[in-house]
Image (cartoon, rainbow, N blue to C red):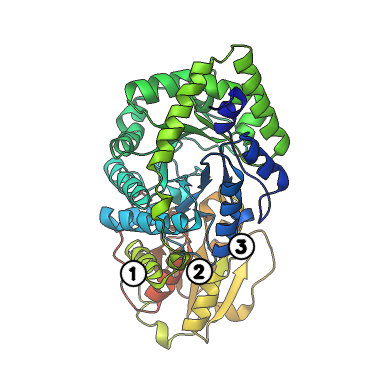
Amino acid sequence: MLTLAQKVGRMMMVGFDGLRPPPYILDWLARGRIGGVYLFARNVQSPAQVQQLVSECRDAAPFPILVGIDQEGGIVARLRDGFSESPGNMALGAAKDSQLAEAVAAMLGREMAALGISWNFAPVADIAHQPDNPSVSTRSVGRNIELVSELVAAQVRGFQRSGVAATVKHFPGLGNTTVDTHVGLARVSGSLDYLYTEDLLPFRRAIAAGVACVMLTHVIYDELDADCPATMSRRIVSDLLRGELGFTGAVSTDCMEMKAITDQVGAGESAVRCVLAGVDLPLFSHTRARQTAAYEAVLAAVQSNRITESRIDESLARIEAMQQQVRLADAPALYVVGCQAHRALAKQAARAGLALLKEGTALSSLRESRVAAVEFAAGRVSDAVEARSQRIFSDYLARRLPKADCHVLDPNDNASLTESLFECDTVILLTRNAHLQPAQFQRAQAIVRRSQRVILVCARDPYDANLLPDADTIICTNGDSRPSLIAAVDAICGDYRPRGQLTVEIG
C-alpha cells in the first residue's frame, strides 16, 4: 500500500545532469518521491553506460519506474554516437511509406528497450503550418494532414511493438505558432476551425492506434481557454482530450521548466495547476529546487484538499496501465544497438526521404569538375535541438571526393572565404535553416552569386530553396541526421537518384 507521499511521488518525472544518477536522485527513487527519470544527451556517453545508468535507477526504486527520453529521430535525438541514428519525420514523410516509418520507429524502440528505456517522447504529430516556426521544423511530417496522421499512427505502432511506450505530442498542436515555448509563452488567437479539421486528426489516429501517452504543449488557445496554456487547462485536458477525443491513457506535460511557464508562475503552483487540469505526469527536466517545489506543492495541495486524493488515484491507475504496456522483459540484448541491420534500415529511409527539387548540369559533370564545398554549421534556432558535431557532411564528402576543397562556416562568423573557392567549377553549399537566420542567408546568397555553379543542399527545412533559387541543383534532405547527410553526399556522387517528395509547399 502506497502512502500519500508515495502516490504523489509516482506522478513526478525528473531529469538530472551527469552520466550516473546523482545521490539525491537515487534517494528520491528509494523513497518513492519520484516515479521515474528521463534522459538527455547530457546523460549519454555509450550504450553500455546508458544501460548501467538506467539499471542503477531501476534498482534503487521499490516499484517499477518509467524511464523516458526524446528519441524522435532526425534533429531531435538524444542517442546518437554509438547508436543508430535515423532520419526524422519530414524525411519519413517525403518517402511516403508508412511501413518504412513503422519499421524505423520499431528499430529505435528496440534500441531503447535494450537500454532499459521504457518511454519515448515521440512521435511528433504537429502540422507544419508555419515556415517560421523555430521548434517544429523537420520534426513535423509536413502539411498534409492525412499523411501526417498515417505516419504518426505507424510510428506509434512501431515504438509500442518494440515494448516502449509512445507519446504523441504536442497536444493540441504546436505547428501554428512562431514562438519557441522554450523561450516564451505562445498564444493562438482567432478561430480554431483549422485545429478541429486538421491538427487534431493525427492525435485521433494515434489514440486509435493505442498510444500510451499524450504530451501537452505550453500554448494558450484563446478560443479554448484564454487564461491557461494547454498544460494547465482543464478545458483542454479533461474536456477536449479526454472528453471529446475519448483518450483514457496517461497525459504528460512538456517540460515545466521552459520559460513559457517559469516566466509566468512558480514551479510548485504550476505543478498543482497541471494536476487540477487532469495531467498525470508533470515533467521537470533540470533544476532540483524546482523539482522539490513541484513535489511539495502537489503533496500540500492534496493534504489541504485543494486536490482530492481520488484525483491522484486516477492518475496512478493510468500510470499503472501505461507501465503494463511496457515489455522490457522481452527486450533484446545490447548488441542490437547500432547493429548493421539497423544502420542499413536508416540508410534506406534516409535515401527514400531525399528530394531532388531542381536538377541542372552540375551533378552529371561533377567528376570532371573542380569542386569546393561550404557547410554552414547549425545556428541556435530552438533549445529543443541539442548541439552536436557539424562536420559529418564535409568529412564524408572529403572521403568521397578527396580533391574537394571543404569549408565549415559559423553563420555568424564574418571570416572571408578564399578566392580559390569561387574559381572552382562547382560549389556544393549546405544550408541549415538559412530562412530563419539572416546572417547565414546573406552569406549563402553571396556564395551563390559569385560561384559558377552551385549544388544547394537544404539540410533542414526545405524553405531555404525559396531563398536561393539560382542554384544549379537543389537537394532537400528534410533533416540533418547522420544518415540523411550521408545520403545527400551519395546522391551528389551519383550513387542513386533521390525520389522523395516534399511534404510542405515552398513556392
Q: Position of residue 464 (x, y in %)?
A: 47, 56
Which label's residue is closer to the chain start, 3 or 2?
3
Classed neighbour count for the residue bearing mark 3: other residues with Cα under 10 Å, few (<14), some (14–19), many (≥20): some
**Lateral position of residue 95 relative to residue 29, left or right:** left
Mark identifier at residue 45: 3
Is 259 drawn above or below residue 448 in the view shown? Answer: above
**Residue 359 marker:** 1
**Residue 280 shown left or right of residue 160 in the figure:** right
Question: Picture coordinates of residue 329 (x, y %)?
Answer: 41, 52
Residue depicted at x 62% and y 22%: 298
Q: Residue at x 64, y 28 (%)?
A: 295
Mark 2 lies on a secondary structure that is strand
What amino acid type is highlighted by mark number 3? Gln
Q: Are marks 3 and 1 in contact (CB under 8 Å)?
A: no
C-alpha span from label 2 to label 1: 15 Å
Check the image and report above or below for 277 versus 415.
above
The amino acid type, in three-letter code, at marker 1 is: Glu
Q: Nearer the viewer, residue 350 or 134?
A: 350
Regarding residue 172, the answer to whether it shows in the image is: no
Q: Which residue is mark 2?
A: 429
**What residue do we see at 50% from left, 57% from top?**
115
- Seen from the viewer's position, the closer of residues 254 and 442 is 254
Please give the label number shown on residue 118: none
For label 2, the crowd category at 10 Å Cα-Cα, with few meaning under 14, some 14 to 19 and many 20 or more, is many
The picture places residue 381, in percent across and down from the top left corner, at 58, 49
Q: CA distance from mark 3 to mark 2?
A: 32 Å
